[in-house]
């Protein structure tokens, strides 16, 4: 089976934030599994980036709204005889459980981390290039020299603040990505454009191409339309749109 590269473009701000958080959650979890000082540095940096996003918006409310919206969509499918009722009930149960967990969260997500003096000192220095080096933050340097198990336990404890949100966003995005079939399309001379139906808002545009494709996809769009351009990568200069016709798989995720 040929592998492929999938390019995604969110078409609203809520999903844009969810995709950024999904990226940070995945990146942070990958470094959490590592044992080196550099793994611990990268994991903590990811936790602080996640915390920064939560400082700018009431994401707990946004996640709850999206879970409840998708629950209503799924409940309407219960009357459809062609729906896999077992799978549908499983998804509804997962969403109900996550909604209950979300309601049980008290206060602002990550509030304890924002009040942590040790983390605050690292956050302040992280904005400066090289600002978290050993001589700038001796307390951080000391912590990084602790045994691997000590660092792992502390990082997992900090990351646990976002666990329910991470699970919720993972399920939300999975549901959105699986909400529509892939359709084969062709970008003539490397360009494709489509108008969107405002009565069924699209949340994510996904473009899939074989992993050996010579061009990368650049997607842009809003609620009215979107475009896909296939560009030749030129690392020393600006990418150029190809003149070739490029077959690809398109998914307009509309749940």
Image: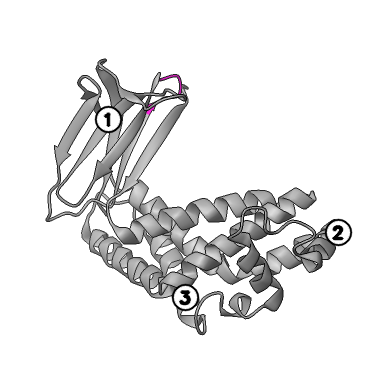
Can you see residue 86?
A: no
Tell whether position 211 is magenta.
Answer: yes
Q: In which quarter of the image is residue 195?
A: top left
Label 3 sits on a secondary structure element that is helix
Snapshot quadrant of residue 58: bottom left
User: Viewer-nearest of labels 2 and 3?
Assistant: 2
Task: Tell me residue 107's x, y (percent).
Answer: 50, 84
Quarter of the image that includes the C terminus: bottom left
How far across and down, in percent of the image, does residue 129 sit? Answer: 62, 53
Q: Is residue 85 magenta?
A: no
Nearer the observer: mark 3 or 1; the answer is 1
What label sits on residue 229 in the rendered view? 1
Left/right placement of residue 198 relative to residue 183 reads left
**Front position in the image: 200 or 32:** 32
Q: Which residue lies furthest to the top in this view?
A: 244
Mark 2 residue crowding within 10 angstroms, few (<14) / some (14–19) / many (20+): few
Q: Earlier along the polypeptide chain: callout 3 or callout 1? A: 3
Q: Distance between the residues labelled 3 and 1?
A: 39 Å
Residue 102, numbered circle: 3
Question: Of helix, strand and loop, which one carries label 1?
Answer: strand
Q: Which residue is drawn at 61% across and 58% down?
A: 128
Dot 3, how many residues are within 10 Å of its Cα: few (below 14), some (14-19), or many (20+)?
Answer: some
Marks 2/3: CA–CA distance = 36 Å
Q: Where is residue 246 in the image (x, y as percent from the top left)?
A: 28, 20
Residue bearing the label numbered 2: 145
Q: How many labels does the image show?
A: 3
Q: Which residues are the magenta region?
A: 209-213
């Amino acid at each position: 089976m040929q592998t492929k590269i999938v390019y995604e473009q969110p078409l609203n701000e809520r999903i844009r934030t969810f995709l950024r958080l999904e990226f940070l959650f995945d990146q942070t979890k990958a470094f959490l599994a590592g044992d080196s000082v550099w793994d611990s540095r990268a994991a903590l940096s990811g936790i602080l980036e996640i915390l920064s996003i939560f400082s700018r918006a009431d994401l707990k409310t946004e996640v709850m709204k999206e879970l409840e919206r998708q629950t209503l969509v799924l409940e309407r499918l219960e009357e459809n005889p062609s729906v896999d009722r077992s799978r549908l009930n499983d998804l509804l149960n997962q969403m109900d459980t996550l909604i209950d967990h979300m309601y049980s969260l008290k206060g602002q997500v990550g509030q304890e981390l924002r009040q942590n003096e040790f983390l605050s000192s690292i956050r302040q220095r992280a904005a400066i290039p090289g600002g978290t080096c050993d001589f700038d933050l001796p307390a951080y340097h000391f912590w990084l020299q602790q045994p691997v198990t000590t660092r792992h336990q502390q990082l997992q404890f900090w990351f646990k603040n976002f666990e329910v949100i991470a699970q919720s966003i993972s399920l939300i995005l999975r549901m959105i990505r699986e909400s529509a079939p892939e359709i084969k399309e062709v970008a003539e001379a490397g360009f494709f454009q489509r108008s969107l139906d405002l009565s069924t808002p699209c949340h994510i545009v996904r473009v899939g191409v074989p992993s050996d494709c010579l061009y990368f996809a650049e997607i842009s769009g809003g609620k009215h339309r979107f475009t896909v351009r296939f560009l030749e990568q030129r690392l020393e200069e600006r990418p150029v749109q190809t003149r070739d016709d490029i077959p690809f798989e398109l998914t307009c995720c509309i749940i």
